[in-house]
Image (tube, rainbow, N blue to C red):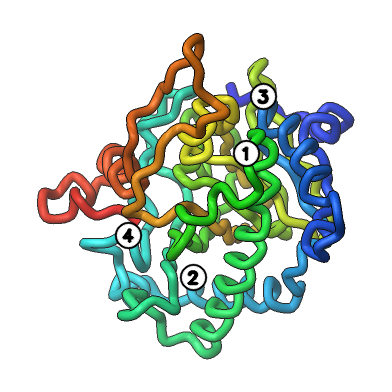
Amino acid sequence: MIDQPDQGSAAAARIPILDVGPLLAGQPGAAAALGRQVAVTAADTGFLVIANHGVPQPIIDTAFAAAADFFALAEDAKLALKIGAENIGYLPYGGQTVRTSTVSKVTRPNNSESFYIVTPDALPDRNRWPEVAGFRAAHLAYFTAMRAVAHRLLPAFALALDLAPDYFEADFIDPNGIVRLIQYAPQPEEEADLFGFAPHTDGSFLTLLPQSKFPGLEVRTREGEWLRPPSLPGTLVVNTGEMLAHYSNDRFKPTPHRVLNRSPNIRHAMPFFYGPNRHRVISCAPTCVSADNPARYAPSTSAERNAVKDKLNFPHRQKPEFASESY
């Protein structure tokens, strides 16, 4: 049986709505104030909702529409862009089974299909752009806007860990950014071990998610309850990932979350995953280790960490020629 999520006062208390407008405007003291709020929620659910984030709603709306246009293509047109040696392009139904879940034994693939976009302004551009009118332009604008706001949140997370505001800057030169467009099939009836996206944690430092038209995202608290983040139009849901857990020596652990599309409608999501440079070796932050609390993680790169996880979760990654690449 799948537990029903809490959508009321408990969710509102555990997943706060924070105004990041003062931070983005450069107001004195805004980063420190936001850092204090982040410290509380990142140590609890790891989820928050941000308002006044500066990403224009038309950019988000246009990107959602372009994603829907892509997923509406004939299957052979989508499969022509199927992911291969890199996790870039189309992932069909059946392409991912979350075997690394810490809270659920998952045996069935996610009931969803995806399309991956990596840093579009890098040279060469490795993306596999579909021949859908306006798609590339829409997602260039979306990627650029989401990357900008994600980067401007870094000082608040540094201050939340009692670090200098610019602590993460060097590691985020040529950062790793990924947009994953997801289409969830309707799942109105409960079916054992079938999820739009099975319980998992993100491999990113931060994940930013525009509000979807239909509900589906559910967050698991430390006590084992499932909550739905507040659904406020125009806001972004933000959650911490495994790379921030590495930096924080598990002070800020990522929280398992899942997606169940109980509506009778197709549901779309566009998470933006933000992390340090893939080849930068990162270590636990000095404020998060001590003689009584030694480092739980050896220095490593995000490319190394995610390659191990992806080999377990993606069947195509188990092929020798694909196993070493991860984005």
Residue topped by disc 3: 221
Badge nearest the viewer, 3 or 2: 3
Q: Is residue 60 above or below residue 105?
A: below
Q: CA distance from mark 2 to mark 1?
A: 43 Å
Q: Earlier in the sequence, mark 2 or mark 4?
A: 2
| Mark 3 touches mark 4? (CB < 8 Å) | no
Residue tagged 1: 163
User: Against 7, is 294 above or below?
Assistant: above
Which amino acid type is marked by label 2? Phe
N-terminal of the pair, mark 2 or mark 1, is 2
Q: Quadrant of residue 41?
A: top right
**Cα distance between the residues tagged 3 and 2:** 32 Å
Left or right side of 85 for 265: right
Nearest the viewer among 201 and 297 is 297
Tell me where residue 219 sits by quadrant: top right
Give residue 202's position: percent from left, percent from top: 49, 42
- Going by the numbered disc 1, the residue's amino acid type is Leu
Q: Residues within 10 Å of mark 2 (few under 14, many from 20)?
A: some
Residues marked 3 and 2 touching at CB (< 8 Å): no
- The numbered mark at residue 219 is none
Query: Which structural element holds mark 4?
Result: loop
Residue sitting at 32 percent across and 54 percent down? 279
Q: Is residue 188 left or right of residue 83?
A: right
Give the residue type that dot 3 points to.
Thr
Q: Position of residue 9 (x, y in %)?
A: 89, 30
Which residue matches tag 2? Answer: 71
Q: Is residue 27 visible?
A: yes
Distance (Cα) linking label 2 and label 4: 17 Å
Q: Amino acid at mark 4?
A: Asn
State the separation of the CA atoms marked 1 and 3: 26 Å
Observer-nearest residue: 305 or 321? 305
